[in-house]
Amino acid sequence: MNQFTEYKVVHIVEGGCGTLLLGSSGLPLQRLEAELNQYAQDGWQVVFQVIEKKRYMLFWQREAVIVTLGR
């Protein structure tokens, strides 16, 4: 089992304009991939991730990914 000495939490949210105009725009996968690759180069590993849905401006829902990294 891995023992990590430090942790980092990354929060990536889907775009607001797409949510307003289209009702849903999806998560920005290219941005998520780029950020995770950058953290991996610095020695971080994904420990846990969760996708949350929150109300956005009363009528819409917006998704976000919360990723916990450790090293």
Image: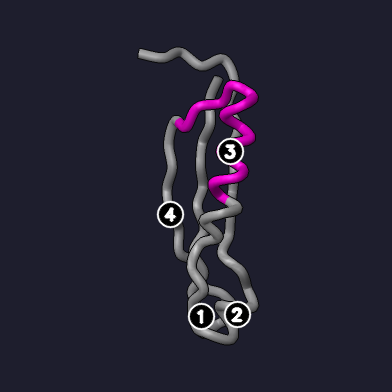
Q: Could you tell me if the residues under marks 2 and 1 are in contact, i.e. CB atoms within 8 Å?
A: yes
Secondary element at tag 4:
strand
The residue under label 4 is: 51
Alpha-carbon span between mark 1 and mark 4: 16 Å
- Between 61 and 20, the residue placed more toward the observer is 20
Q: Earlier in the sequence, mark 1 or mark 4?
A: 4
Residue 24 at what x, y percent from top left?
49, 77
The residue under label 2 is: 57
Alpha-carbon span between mark 4 and mark 2: 19 Å
* Quarter of the C terminus within the rendering: top right
| Majority secondary structure in the magenta region | helix
Secondary element at tag 3:
strand
The residue under label 3 is: 9
The residue under label 1 is: 60
* Amino acid type, residue under disc 2 in the picture: Met
Which quarter of the picture shows residue 43?
top right
Q: Residues within 10 Å of mark 3 (few under 14, many from 20)?
A: few
Q: Earlier in the sequence, mark 3 or mark 2?
A: 3
Q: Could you tell me if the residues under marks 1 and 4 are in contact, i.e. CB atoms within 8 Å?
A: no
Q: Could you tell me if the residues under marks 4 and 2 are in contact, i.e. CB atoms within 8 Å?
A: no
